Image: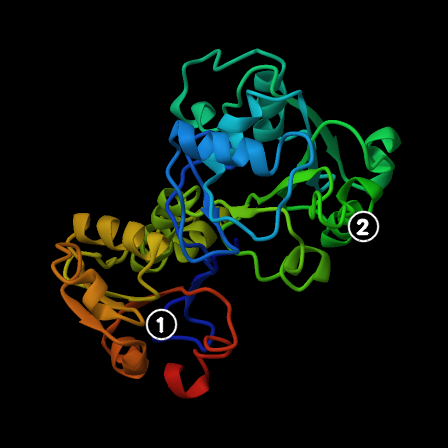
Amino acid sequence: TSFAFAPLRSTARSVSASRPFSNTTSAGIFNSRGFATLRSSSSSSSSCAAAASVHQQYLTTPKQHTHRRAMSATAVSAAATAVPTTTLLVVTSPSLANSDPIKRLLLNAQGGGNANNDAAEDLLLLPPGAFDVRVGTCVDDFPRDVLDSAEGSPVAVLFWFGDAGVLRDVLRSECAKPKPGVMPQGRLAWVHSGSAGVEHLLKLPEVREGAAPLTNAKGAFSASLGEWAIFGCMWFAKKVNAMRKSQQAGKWMRGSVGMLQGKTMSIVGYGDIGKACAQRAKAMGMRVVALRRNPARSAGDDNVDELLPLSDLHKAMAAGDFVVLALPHTPETNKMVDAAAIA
């Protein structure tokens, strides 16, 4: 997920940008609390019955499977505790392979648990012993005996901001090849995206047409991005760039700065990230204008002063001192914020 910002009234690149895409709330990049199932419009609870169903359909010996079931990642993770160890292939980038989230994931999978009792670390908890975690930045980093065999224990994939081409190669391997009439997804039990937006992954036929459940991390970064939106507003209101230049020149900057209180934040796309931005904007005393496809879904939201349909984009941008763009990237939203909207 990217998030860029600039002052609305001073430049053409003046929109805070973020791209959420999901359909149920979750927390964490990979945990047992629940993610969004993207290949269905509904989601299941994490009940024992749901877990048993997932266990039967995806993570055990081959069974008849003729349709895709709506299911939460909670159910998938819970089911994994009842079957032989699942090999988790983490597709990431060289710069992230040794990052703290990956280290915590590996530690937890080895039974290390949450050593610091940290809430952030708790988001990465996995059932001890349920996953054999393998981290790679190219397909050759993963065990060939896992990739090249159509038989064996289940395989799951976590795409953690890596190369989509590596994910494609993993999904083309023998372990992901279907067994017609028996196991449509092969050994592949689960594909999870560490980001909320998955449009870049759905460009791959192997992902788009695959039979294994695909989940995303809606909600995992909403609080952080909500803070980032406030940071962007503060950057310009408090003239931080000018202060930094003054500091570098060894001069004391004297002058007035603005306040967020009383200013208007227009949020285009009032989903999970948009709501996190609104909550923090209201705490700063800002007026919030929110746009979404169906404004009635947010009726009565105490963090919003005015609800508008997406068709009122120009009105909202004209009213906003700051604009946050928090829409999924779809054909409908592509280039929605154009020169006419910013003018």
Q: Residue at x 43, y 37 (%)?
A: 34
Label located before the other in sequence (2 or 1): 1
In the displayed structure, would residue 8 be above or below residue 55? below
> Residue 291 vs residue 333: left or right?
left
Question: For the residue carrying disc 1, how many other residues have a C-alpha within 10 Å: few (<14), some (14-19), or many (20+)?
Answer: many
In the displayed structure, would residue 274 be above or below residue 139? below
- Element under label 2? loop
| Residue 159 in picture, x, y percent from top left | 64, 43
Q: Residue at x 40, y 41 (%)?
A: 26
Identify the image quadrant of the C terminus: bottom left
| Cα gap from disc 2 to disc 1, whole angstroms | 45 Å
2 or 1: mark nearer the eye: 2
Q: Which mark is residue 320?
A: none
> Residue 294 vs residue 334: left or right?
left
Tell me if residue 153 can be seen: yes
Q: Which residue is mark 2?
A: 172
Amino acid bearing label 2: Arg
- The residue lying toward the viewer, choosing from 322 and 114, is 114
In the displayed structure, would residue 46 be above or below residue 343? above
> Residue 303 vs residue 142: left or right?
left
Tell me if residue 31 can be seen: no
- Element under label 1? loop
- The residue lying toward the viewer, choosing from 79 and 131, is 79
| Residue 8 in picture, x, y percent from top left | 36, 72
Q: Which residue is mark 1?
A: 8
Q: Residue at x 58, y 38 (%)?
A: 57
Question: For the residue carrying disc 2, how many other residues have a C-alpha within 10 Å: few (<14), some (14-19), or many (20+)?
Answer: some
Amino acid bearing label 1: Leu
Q: How is the image coloured?
A: rainbow
Q: How many numbered callouts? A: 2
- The residue lying toward the viewer, choosing from 155 and 302, is 155
